[in-house]
Image (spheres, coloured by chain):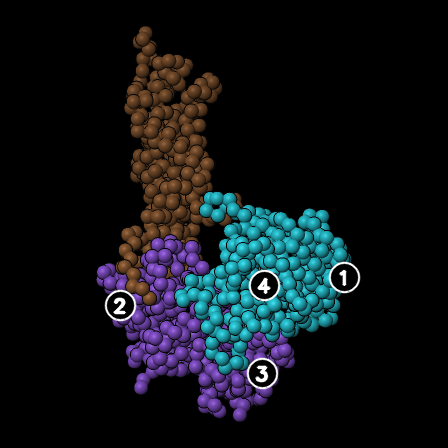
Chain colours: A cyan, B purple, C brown
């Protein structure tokens, strides 16, 4: 495992409406990234996936702090301050707004060379050669090094951002929603490029996204997060074909399949909980059609599962097959409420 | 029966700033957002307009609601040309054609209460205040936000994305329009919320007999909502047909690439190279003839000489392509 | 579904202006700097209102000592808290009454600048086209005029009265607020809810006043607060240079008198330091308040 996240807790201190509150954005998340694999971190807005990745990278917002758990990279525990240098060199991060965070007054090539000379300690000429190499790696023509960001299309800017992330030869790439803002054809080209990079450079990757189709296309393993916790993880094929957690089952229903003739889209009623005051027990219980009273109480969930690689944080894991069947029936989800409150 | 909305050869060019050289040479560069679009929307139809950014679909939606004026061509609503509408007749049109926005967080004035926001169209239409409450209440019922009292006093920032989008829908429906343009109505919502809004939109359409245009880049969504789909590329319609057919048997090379590019939630999906080359060209200087020819794997000499027109093809499609 | 009783129509203003004004009035309560500024203003306003009670002596009256001599350059004492000028006038009375002139100048300039700037900014920004071009060219012309010389020339033509000075200041200060408000309107015009208003049939004027204006009002207040300070300083400068209204009492006049009678070399600090300090206080207070409104307008400027 190149990266192991163990019981990570990230809290934000906010002053919402005057009172001081602590938002538990990540509340005991654990997952691992095997070396040379692409892991998809998937969940909806507010589930903590971006926060988790930023914590691994050490770039939390000012009012955020790691309140518990640990991050282990290549066998060494990462603490916030001391290993920041290590983090940017061996772990690279492409944030969500990478496309628009290129400096508009410098050419893209100049920005890439700057990373190489300042951070990578390469000489000017070596840096320029490497910059051309990096562009080639991400499918950009070398002549484009002299262009300014505004002359690049969205897809090209994303490629440039990835090139910058790869400049210092990291072993792990963390990409936050790298294709969300792109058109579908460009998105597919970027995803293919990422797969190609991973194979050529033997990179390990964590891909944060809300789109399970993207995860299905690109990732080897998937980690599903909900309300700050990991609720299911395992190989992509397994988790998508045989989900064990009701949330994952519901999520599958919410993604219309282009090719199927089924014309039912089944919503999950309700909305994610307020993370400054999360409910005790399972956080998905209020919206779950299979919730028992035991689910509403009790301490934080622990991943469980008979298959060693496929883990699920559901109390009723041993009935997973039955529940899965019931989850395919739209009526199961409609029973949870008569009218939408989301 | 005459169509509800008719577009004929609609062209929309946005002039761009000229460099000195261009002024001297007498050139008028413009972004050609729409380059000759014609189609009809019948009463009760649900038509999807799909394409990637820059294809002109958003401009098309705005033109159909007279938020933007065409550079050339005509648009008619219920037999009346939009160009001539003004004053009272324009207000009449506005009552019948509404817009559902992409970003629910921005579509409502943050300083208005929810009630005030939904009642605004009634104010603008000059409807008597005594009727407002009833109409707002019935609009809320339609979008399944039953507990009126809970929402009326609140401000937009107090509601979730899904609730806000329902409010936006309610506002669009409060005047009982006949025609709706929905511009990416769920793209900014969480995945688990989208299904609810889409199901709602389908239900409303059926219940109110609305004609609707759904603008989206997401083919899978569109599949759920619309029987008919128009595929646009660089300001032109390249394919027009039943949604199911378009998705299963796309005829135009661009549509084929588009359909092949959509990922599905299946780990065993095909991962073949896309049948398309290069990037979207500059909208100010589209290629001559067929605007897709520089990316098309089947381009022929004829494609650069002659712009293909929409012609009937198999399975109820219309395709703008020289291929047979 | 159970039939519910008809909900009461919420009784609130249809125009979000009142909540906006309320919020702006409440702003100083949250910002300590702005609160200080407000306190200073309140203090000066009270002084201006009760000037007659605080300083019963006529500021322009030439005073004589008990022995019949001119009470010139008397040092600060019980009778004359700040002493007298070289013409035997009570400095303290001048200072107190000068407050009225200062506030009158400041506030009237602020009102004119804020109103003209806001209206021009709204109209130019929203309607665009020729209207915008014409208005902005006029603004450009006003901005290209040198400030103090213009004021002096204008008062030379129209007469050196306080109202003419205010007019001159307003003529030169409105473009700043107009331009900034205009660019803000340009942004707001593209917001989805403005488009929504158009689609639902709102008229342009309605959109302007109901949707756009309330969002730029904090900006108007920022520029109003800035204008107060500018106007007072300009009036003081013009008076100091000798072009001011000699019949009125103002801090600028006091400085002029002190300068021309060489009060500094005589060490008569009580004459020119107080008016200088007062000018500084009022201008700084205006700055603090404008800073507070800036943060209302752009919450990101505030700390988290």
Which of label 1 and label 4 is nearer to you? 4
Which chain is mark 2 on?
B
* Residue underneath mark 2: B87
Q: Do badges 1 and 4 share one subunit?
A: yes
* Residue underneath mark 1: A126
Q: Mark 1 and mark 3: span between their CA atoms?
A: 38 Å
Q: Is residue C247 above or below residue B30?
A: above
Which of label 1 and label 3 is nearer to you? 3
**x 31%, y 64%: residue:** C2
Which of label 1 and label 2 is nearer to you? 2
Q: Nearer the viewer, residue A7 or C257?
A: A7
The disc at residue A83 is: none
Q: Secondary structure at mark 4?
A: loop
Q: Nearer the viewer, residue C16 or A247?
A: A247
The disc at residue A314 is: 4
Q: Nearer the viewer, residue A287 or B262?
A: A287
Q: Residues within 10 Å of mark 4 (few under 14, many from 20)?
A: many
- In the figure, residue A212 lies in which quadrant? bottom right
Q: Secondary structure at mark 2?
A: helix
Q: Residues within 10 Å of mark 2 (few under 14, many from 20)?
A: few
* Residue underneath mark 3: B296
């Amino acid at each position: 495992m190149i990266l192991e996240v163990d019981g990570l807790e990230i809290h934000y201190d906010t002053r919402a409406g005057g009172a001081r509150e602590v938002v538990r954005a990540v509340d005991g998340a654990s997952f691992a990234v095997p070396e040379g694999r692409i892991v998809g971190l998937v969940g909806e807005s507010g589930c903590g996936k971006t926060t988790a990745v930023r914590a691994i990278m050490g770039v939390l917002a000012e009012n955020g702090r790691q309140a518990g758990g640990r991050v282990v990279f290549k066998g060494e525990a990462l603490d916030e301050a001391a290993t920041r240098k290590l983090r940017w060199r061996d772990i690279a991060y492409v944030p969500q707004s990478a496309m628009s965070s290129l400096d508009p007054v410098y050419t893209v090539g100049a920005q890439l060379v700057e990373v190489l000379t300042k951070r990578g300690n390469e000489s000017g000429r070596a840096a320029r050669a490497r910059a051309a190499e990096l562009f080639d790696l991400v499918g950009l023509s070398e002549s484009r090094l002299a262009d300014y960001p505004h002359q690049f299309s969205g897809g090209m800017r994303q490629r440039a951002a990835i090139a910058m992330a790869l400049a210092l030869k990291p072993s792990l790439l963390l990409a936050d929603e790298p294709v969300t803002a792109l058109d579908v054809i460009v998105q597919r080209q970027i995803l293919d490029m990422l797969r190609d990079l991973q194979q050529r450079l033997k990179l390990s990757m964590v891909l944060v996204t809300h789109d399970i189709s993207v995860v299905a296309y690109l990732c080897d393993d998937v980690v599903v997060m909900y309300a700050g916790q990991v609720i299911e993880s395992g190989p992509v094929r397994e988790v998508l074909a045989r989900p064990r957690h009701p949330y994952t089952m519901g999520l599958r229903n919410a993604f219309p399949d282009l090719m199927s003739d089924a014309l039912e889209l089944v919503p999950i009623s309700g909305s994610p909980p307020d993370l400054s005051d999360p409910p005790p027990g399972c956080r998905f219980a209020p919206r779950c059609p299979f919730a028992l009273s035991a689910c509403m109480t009790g301490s934080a969930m622990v991943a469980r599962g008979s298959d060693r690689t496929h883990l699920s944080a559901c109390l009723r894991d041993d009935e997973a097959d039955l529940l899965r069947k019931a989850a395919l029936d739209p009526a199961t989800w409609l029973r949870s409420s008569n009218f939408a409150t989301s | 029966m005459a169509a509800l909305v008719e577009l004929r050869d609609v062209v929309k060019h946005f002039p761009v700033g000229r460099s000195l050289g261009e002024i001297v040479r007498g050139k008028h560069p413009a972004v050609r957002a729409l380059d000759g679009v014609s189609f009809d929307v019948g009463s009760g139809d649900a038509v999807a307009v799909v394409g990637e950014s820059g294809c002109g679909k958003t401009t098309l939606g705005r033109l159909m609601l007279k938020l933007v004026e065409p550079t050339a061509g005509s648009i008619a609503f219920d037999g009346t040309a939009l160009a001539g509408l003004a004053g009272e007749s324009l207000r009449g049109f506005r009552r019948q054609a509404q817009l559902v926005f992409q970003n629910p967080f921005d579509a409502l004035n943050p300083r208005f209460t929810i009630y005030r926001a939904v009642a605004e169209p009634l104010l603008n239409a000059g409807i008597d205040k005594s009727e407002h409450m009833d109409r707002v209440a019935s609009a809320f019922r339609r979008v399944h936000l039953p507990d009126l009292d809970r929402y009326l006093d609140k401000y937009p920032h107090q509601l979730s994305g899904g609730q806000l989008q329902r409010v936006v829908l309610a506002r669009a429906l409060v005047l009982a329009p006949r025609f709706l343009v929905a511009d990416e109505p769920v793209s900014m919502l969480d995945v688990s919320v989208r299904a609810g809004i889409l199901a709602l939109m389908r239900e409303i359409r059926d219940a109110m007999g609305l004609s609707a245009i759904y603008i989206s880049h997401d083919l899978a969504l569109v599949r759920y909502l619309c029987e008919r789909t128009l595929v646009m590329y660089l300001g032109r319609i390249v394919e027009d047909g039943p949604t199911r057919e378009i998705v299963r048997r796309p005829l135009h090379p661009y549509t084929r690439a588009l359909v092949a590019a959509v990922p599905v939630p299946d780990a065993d999906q095909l991962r073949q190279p896309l049948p398309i080359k290069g990037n979207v060209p500059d909208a100010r200087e589209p290629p001559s003839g067929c605007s897709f020819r520089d990316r098309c794997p089947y381009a022929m000499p004829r494609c650069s000489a002659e712009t293909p027109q929409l012609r009937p093809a198999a399975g109820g499609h219309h395709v703008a392509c020289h291929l047979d | 579904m159970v039939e519910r009783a008809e909900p009461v129509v919420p009784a609130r203003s249809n125009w979000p202006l009142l909540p906006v004004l309320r919020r702006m009035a409440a702003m100083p309560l949250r910002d300590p700097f702005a609160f200080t500024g407000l306190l200073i203003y309140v203090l000066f306003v009270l002084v201006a209102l009760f000037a007659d009670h605080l300083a019963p002596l006529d500021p322009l009256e030439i005073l004589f000592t008990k022995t019949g001599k001119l009470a010139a350059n008397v040092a600060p004492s019980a009778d004359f808290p700040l002493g007298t000028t070289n013409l035997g006038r009570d400095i303290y009375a001048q200072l107190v009454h000068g407050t009225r002139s200062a506030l009158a100048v400041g506030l009237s300039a602020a009102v004119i600048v804020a109103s003209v700037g806001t209206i021009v900014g709204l109209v130019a920004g929203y309607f665009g086209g020729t209207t915008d071009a014409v208005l902005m060219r006029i603004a450009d012309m006003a901005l290209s005029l040198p400030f103090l010389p213009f004021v002096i020339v204008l008062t030379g033509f129209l007469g050196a009265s306080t109202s003419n000075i205010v007019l001159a200041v307003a003529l030169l200060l409105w473009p700043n607020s107009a331009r900034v408000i205009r660019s803000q309107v340009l942004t707001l015009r593209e917001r989805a809810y403005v488009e929504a208003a158009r689609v639902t049939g709102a008229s342009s004027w309605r959109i302007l006043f109901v949707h756009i204006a309330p969002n730029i009002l904090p900006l108007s207040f920022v520029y109003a607060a800035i204008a107060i300070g500018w106007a007072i300083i300009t009036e003081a400068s013009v008076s100091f240079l000798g072009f001011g209204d000699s019949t009125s009492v103002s801090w600028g006049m006091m400085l002029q008198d002190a300068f021309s009678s060489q009060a500094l070399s005589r060490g008569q600090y009580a004459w020119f330091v107080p008016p200088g300090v007062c000018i500084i206080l009022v201008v700084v207070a205006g700055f603090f308040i404008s800073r507070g409104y800036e943060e209302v307008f752009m919450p990101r400027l505030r700390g988290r």
